[in-house]
Amino acid sequence: MKFSLLQIAQLLSAQIEGNAQVEISNVAKIQEAKTGDIAFLANPKYEPYIYTTQASAVIVNKDFQPKQAVSATLLRVEDAYTAFSKLLLEYEKLINSPKKGIEQPCYIHEKAIVGENVYVGAFTYISEKAQIGSNTQIYPNVFIGENVKIGENTIIYAGVKIYKNCVIGNNCIIHAGAVIGSDGFGFAPQTDGSFQTIPQLGNVVIEDNVSIGANTTIDRATLGATLIKKGVKIDNLVQIAHNVVIGENTVIAAQVGIAGSTEVGANCMFGGQVGIAGHLKIANKVNIGAQSGLGTDITQENTNWQGSPAIDLKEFYRAYAVFKKLPEIYKKLTQIERQLQED
Amino acid sequence: MKFSLLQIAQLLSAQIEGNAQVEISNVAKIQEAKTGDIAFLANPKYEPYIYTTQASAVIVNKDFQPKQAVSATLLRVEDAYTAFSKLLLEYEKLINSPKKGIEQPCYIHEKAIVGENVYVGAFTYISEKAQIGSNTQIYPNVFIGENVKIGENTIIYAGVKIYKNCVIGNNCIIHAGAVIGSDGFGFAPQTDGSFQTIPQLGNVVIEDNVSIGANTTIDRATLGATLIKKGVKIDNLVQIAHNVVIGENTVIAAQVGIAGSTEVGANCMFGGQVGIAGHLKIANKVNIGAQSGLGTDITQENTNWQGSPAIDLKEFYRAYAVFKKLPEIYKKLTQIERQLQED
Amino acid sequence: MKFSLLQIAQLLSAQIEGNAQVEISNVAKIQEAKTGDIAFLANPKYEPYIYTTQASAVIVNKDFQPKQAVSATLLRVEDAYTAFSKLLLEYEKLINSPKKGIEQPCYIHEKAIVGENVYVGAFTYISEKAQIGSNTQIYPNVFIGENVKIGENTIIYAGVKIYKNCVIGNNCIIHAGAVIGSDGFGFAPQTDGSFQTIPQLGNVVIEDNVSIGANTTIDRATLGATLIKKGVKIDNLVQIAHNVVIGENTVIAAQVGIAGSTEVGANCMFGGQVGIAGHLKIANKVNIGAQSGLGTDITQENTNWQGSPAIDLKEFYRAYAVFKKLPEIYKKLTQIERQLQED
């Protein structure tokens, strides 16, 4: 496949600077691009590569000012990263087409309802009364429990397990190995030191446009639903405990753990390996830095947190800068004490 | 299904306060309950809901003193949480019945032994000489290796993988995607900087009444057994390395990691994302707070730990309270130094 | 199977001390060994067991000086741990033989290419144009995507999922439930607060002699490849994000997370639960202690890091030793201030 730069410029509402006659046949990273490739530059860290790249064209921000000669044709846009991702989306549509058809052997219960143009891979198991919406793709080795409802245009990758009664929306992507609806971790202590399992009778509800990462686990509620609201993006190996609610468009990086019954607001961002205790409420637009541990409610929107336990981000970094000086501080203090005693 | 409040009161040895004639058809959270539902109140954080709930009945602790009028009938019990979980157990028995029968296609080796009333889901693989006890349920897409022994009344959810020679007890629950018996992480460094894999010839032994969470991994021992003793409860995405021993009734929250050869006592509780180094010994009844990192033996029972590296819980929180003041401390110290030099 | 001690001594180039006539039938841990077993002693922590063990023979370091009488025959070698692992390797070859043959039902696309002496377990799915090298073993319930290339003598355990276009080398081991090639976590923020998925069109390339742990996830690159170089050893539940590069013979313990586009050098060692931010460069032979969080490049080889954010290991431990004294420091400082004001 070859594209003219004019086609691409039109798609991205870009201004062409340089040779407009180049032909593009592939997309690539700026540091690896070859003739015929189009790349992009958004993160200033990668600017040096634009002066050496062999890419035929590079998408840049409107206000990019080269400090040296650039041989590639520039496509100036409002936001280079967004424009490039738009280009990737179009390119992906050309090279990938959705899978369709029911492969054999698979197990579809006679009381399951499967919509139009659905893909069901071999060795996938669809239980009684499950419903699969049209144009949804279910890869091989997937388990769909009783009475599960899955919307339209959703992709369920290989080896996903969805327990009974869970609900998945439209346009969702669930990556390989994710587990939706496993029992919440609830046990009542007994007098002999052992624990009685508390039945988990609720489900998991995942709204539209949600992404769930590979091998992520989301537990079913004890009663009611563990709720992932629309537009939420969850990375790999994340743990969402029972009865948790995640607000719209919140983004959760890999290996985060959120304990039971916590309610997270909309448009929050949690860095990798963050841990959040149970029964908390977190306001909208809260950012929590990687590896932080949250133990209290956050009531104020638009705040940034860091540390374990997490405190205000700036306060944390100011304190941590001094933390390194603790041996020096301790020494000075001891000297002062001695000096004062001598006085 | 409808139940009279008298039936429920009898089951829970509860004292009825209010209208004893209400009929109950469902269990619900106090903040979401509707007419016909029974809810419970144990955590004081949820007390406000008891004055507004539409639940027909609420289970409360014996000594609960309402501060306002409550319209629901109260069921007073010794311990509301335990009583409610007992009710859930009975309710679950009514709505769920154990699965039975061998679904096709599945793969059961001719030298495998399968007990009575066993459920084997489609696409499940049972290897040579494996033994499955009576009334055990094995969901679809499970892999059971050679010579694995599984007890009675155990539930193995979809996509669990159990490597050869491992032993699983009675009344266990293993959630979807868990991996039991993968190779321990052992490599001998070579002079060229590469590593030689050390064969892991042991197994994993899981005793009775153990719960294992979704996508949790438990490695086989190099020699002998990685041992999970009876009554242990392990949450999702936990890592248990080779040769580890976990004592009876220990509870391990999500994303905890325990390195090789560590021996954990009985009745311990580890919070989420705790990390424990290898070759340690931990006494009974030790609590380690979320995200803590343990690097030394704990010889004293009934102790509480926090931080990375973990220290005494109270000591940690006292120190962390001052940590936030470090910039202030540093400033003061500098001022004092200056003052003393001027003197 | 019985072996003479002479055979074993020859294999390990060991010097025999004591009764050379004993027969060995099994390998065992020194603390559990019985008559007929051979054990080893490398870690001094286990030395007391050598005076009480019932093992018939124990492999020890050349320079081991017993402090009491030892009844077992000693095999003195250059390095006891390496010798023991060599013995285990030989023993494993005797008791395990590689699996072969295609079990039914499995799904092998007619355009897939499968080499000689390959094992394909039941319920395994091999997509169009996938290539499987000779002597490779693929356990049940595995998913291999389109155009995936797997080398020779590689073992893919049960339930592994490999997305399309990924490349796996020779002599690799991928443990159960691992996911290779899931989408990188990339989303472009939109003006309404939602996120647009950025297509991930690259792949994952895993070179020769690599081990990947159970339920570990490695994301495909946006463009180009996420690259795991030869000899790398990765433990369970590790997250490797898109576009990451891991240098040769680097060892990564369980539950580590490495964010997007970071380049890790060769011969590094990362402890459990380490978190590494995106777009970093890490030099060769860098050690990062368990639970540490790295937020900046490391340009110096042979350095040791600890803490979150990570600093020099020794500096961290010196500071942390004083951290515990912070309440005392704060008290002293306040006293000094008061004293100076009174002066």
Image (spheres, coloured by chain):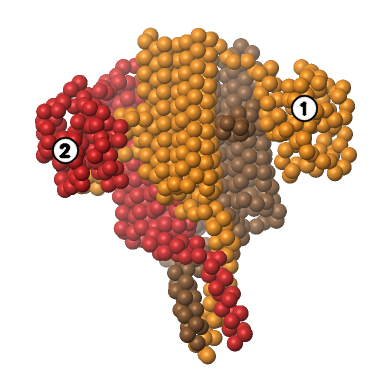
Chain colours: A red, B brown, C orange
Screen quadrant of the N terminus of chain B: top left
* Relative vertical location of residue A121 with respect to residue C246 in this rendering, above or below: above
Q: Quadrant of residue C100?
A: top right
Which residue: 40% across, 20% down?
C148
Which residue: 59% across, 87% down?
A343
Label 1 in the same subunit as label 2: no
Residue type, numbered disc 2: Leu
Mark 2 nearby-residue class (10 Å; few <14, some 14–19, many ≥20): many
Number of marks drawn: 2
The reply, left or right, for residue B295 in relation to residue B175 is right
Q: Is residue C108 visible?
A: yes
Residue type, numbered disc 1: Ala
Residue C14, which numbered label?
A: 1
Q: Quadrant of residue A301?
A: bottom left
* Relative vertical location of residue A64 with respect to residue B122 in this rendering, above or below: below
**C98 and B130: which is toward the camera:** C98
Return the chain for callout 1.
Answer: C
Which residue: 63% across, 39% down?
B260
The reply, left or right, for residue A280 in relation to residue C288 is left
Task: Residue A197 in the image: state x and y as whole percent.
Answer: 57, 42
Q: Is residue B105 visible?
A: no
* Relative vertical location of residue C32 with respect to residue B50 in this rendering, above or below: above
The reply, left or right, for residue A245 in relation to residue C31 is left
Task: Residue A184 in the image: state x and y as whole percent.
Answer: 49, 42
Which residue: 64% across, 13% down?
B111
Return the chain for callout 2.
Answer: A
| Real-space CA distance between mark 1 and mark 2, rounded to the nearest whole angstrom | 68 Å
Mark 1 nearby-residue class (10 Å; few <14, some 14–19, many ≥20): many
The residue tagged 2 is: A74
Task: Residue C318 in the image: state x and y as whole percent.
Answer: 57, 60
Residue sticking out furthest to the bottom: C343
SS class of the residue under badge 2? strand
